[in-house]
């Protein structure tokens, strides 16, 4: 903890630190924005100072509670009266006054720690409000409520009721800002003391103003009714205190493209594209064309598609004409496909047999399984004493044995000779 300066050095120290903190553009508290990210919203140092004081006051409440509860009232009064204004308590509070991630709070505390110590040991009695003493009077970062700027000037409308109570005074309570009033919806003027566009005075006295909305298209009005209009919004015309929609399409105020048509809307108009069949139009659909597009022809009052396939012949061999909207295209006839710019006959692959994709080894295994099933069935019937099936069974076994030996006789003989 920093040691307290001699009493004679405190006033110059306060003056020097206050001068440094009051320099224009308090960049000393602002982190440098990353080059590829948008700059963070600026936080005025007054808000940082207010947060520091609020955290300090919570620390005072916490440390008082932490040191009660011993049961010996006389001892507690003696010890706690000493602890109340002790350096030990101040250290405990300052250690937790800023969160670890609050860089600006730590920076401000580092610059103002000696001021806080001076207030703790010498100024508490005469200046019990730490926020007023530190943030406003000593560091000159904040202003009283309803004022703004380096000189703490009153906001428009007065410090008691800035912006007439219907807006926010920019920079209020800080040594920055322009003092400009950002008015709520429906209010306007320098101090938000007038009704904005589209609103009228429903109530007004020396200290109170209530603005209510006009009827939809009215820009200025004397009341909420349709017939109370005094001025109309753009796209409307005043007629007998009523706002009537202007038909921009009928008055030629609209500006649409050559292949678009105008549609009137309330207070405005829209430009929409003509139908594909039209070259210029007066409305939607092929019946409102000024002229037909290529590939279309006038039939009655409509522009309809021409079927070019009735007259056009596709030049390529094995091609046929296919009509499209406004045109046509040549495609290969059925049974032909496009290949290198010409239509060639499609080769229909022969239907594959059931076992066409099986390997030779797989077929041998399948044959052996089939004959094995048959032999098992015959063996079952032979076991029942049927002479016919017994003879068939013996013949099948002999045939399978002969087949096996004929296919593998060389291999069996070679293995027998070599003793395998």
Image (cartoon, rainbow, N blue to C red):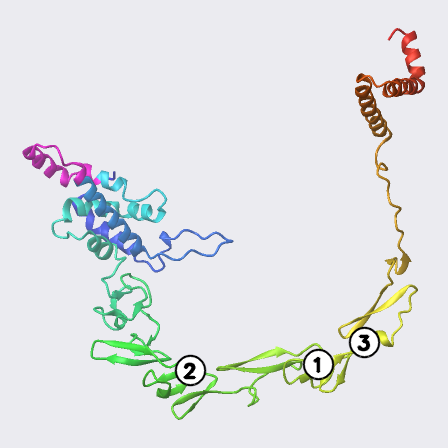
Q: Which image quadrant is residue 225 in?
A: bottom left
Mark 3: give few (<14), some (14-19) or many (20+) Cα within 10 Å. Answer: some
Q: Main secondary structure of the magenta part?
A: helix
Most foreground residue, 174 or 356: 356
- Image position of 281 (left or right of 45): right
Residue 5 makes an appearance in the image: no
Q: Is residue 352 visible?
A: yes
Vertical comparison of 341 with 290: above or below: above
**Within the magenta stretch, is there residue 274?**
no
* Residue holding disc 3: 307
Corner quadrant of residue 92: top left
Q: Disc 2 designates what residue?
A: 217
Q: Nearer the viewer, mark 1 or mark 3?
A: 3
Instruction: Identify the residue position indicated by label 1 in the image.
Output: 278
**Real-space CA distance between mark 1 and mark 3, rounded to the nearest whole angstrom:** 17 Å
In the rendered view, would you say 350 is above or below 302? Answer: above
Magenta-highlighted residues: 65-90
Alpha carbon distance from label 3 to label 2 = 51 Å
SS of the residue under disc 2:
loop
Q: Residue at x 39, y 87 (%)?
A: 231
Please state, as top left, top right, bottom left or bottom right, where the C terminus lies in the image: top right
Residue 205 in percent (x, y) is at: 21, 80
Task: Where is residue 385? Give x, y as percent.
Answer: 82, 16
Give the structural element (helix, strand or loop) at label 3: loop
């Amino acid at each position: 903890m920093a040691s307290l300066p001699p009493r004679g050095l405190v006033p110059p120290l306060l003056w020097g630190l206050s001068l440094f903190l009051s320099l224009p553009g308090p960049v000393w508290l602002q982190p440098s924005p990353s080059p590829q990210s948008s700059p963070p919203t600026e936080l005025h140092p007054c808000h940082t100072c207010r947060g520091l004081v609020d955290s300090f006051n919570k620390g005072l409440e916490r440390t008082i509670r932490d040191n009660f509860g011993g049961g010996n009232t006389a001892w507690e009064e003696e010890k706690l009266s000493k602890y109340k204004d002790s350096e030990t308590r101040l250290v405990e509070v300052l250690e937790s006054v800023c969160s670890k991630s609050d860089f600006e709070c730590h920076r401000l505390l580092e610059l103002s720690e000696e001021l806080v110590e001076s207030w703790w040991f010498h100024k508490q009695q005469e200046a019990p409000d730490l926020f007023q003493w530190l943030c406003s009077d000593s560091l000159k970062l904040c202003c009283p409520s309803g004022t703004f700027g380096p000189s703490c000037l009153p906001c428009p409308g007065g410090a008691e009721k800035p912006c007439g109570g219907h807006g926010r005074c920019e920079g209020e309570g800080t040594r920055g800002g322009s003092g400009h009033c950002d008015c709520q919806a429906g209010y306007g003027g320098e101090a938000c003391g007038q009704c904005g566009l589209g609103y009228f005075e429903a109530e007004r006295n020396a200290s109170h103003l209530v603005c209510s909305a006009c009827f939809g298209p009215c820009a200025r009005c004397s009341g909420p009714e349709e017939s109370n209009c005094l001025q109309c919004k753009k796209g409307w015309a005043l007629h007998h205190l009523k706002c009537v929609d202007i038909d921009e399409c009928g008055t030629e105020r609209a500006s649409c493209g050559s292949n678009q048509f105008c549609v009137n809307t309330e207070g405005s108009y829209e430009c929409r594209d003509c139908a594909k069949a039209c070259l210029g139009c007066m409305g939607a659909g092929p019946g409102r064309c000024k002229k037909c597009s290529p590939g279309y022809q006038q039939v009655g009052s409509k522009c309809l598609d021409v079927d070019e396939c009735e007259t056009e012949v596709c030049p390529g061999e094995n091609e046929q004409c296919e009509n499209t909207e406004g045109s046509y295209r040549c495609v290969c006839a059925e049974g032909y496909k496009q290949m290198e710019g010409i239509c060639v006959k499609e080769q229909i692959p022969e239907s594959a047999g059931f076992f066409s994709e099986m390997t030779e080894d797989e077929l041998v295994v399948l044959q052996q399984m089939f004959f094995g099933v048959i032999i098992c069935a015959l063996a079952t019937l032979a076991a029942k004493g049927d002479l016919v099936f017994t003879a068939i069974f013996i013949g099948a076994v002999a045939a399978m044995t002969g087949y096996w030996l004929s296919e593998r006789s060389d291999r069996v003989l070679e293995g027998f000779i070599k003793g395998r």
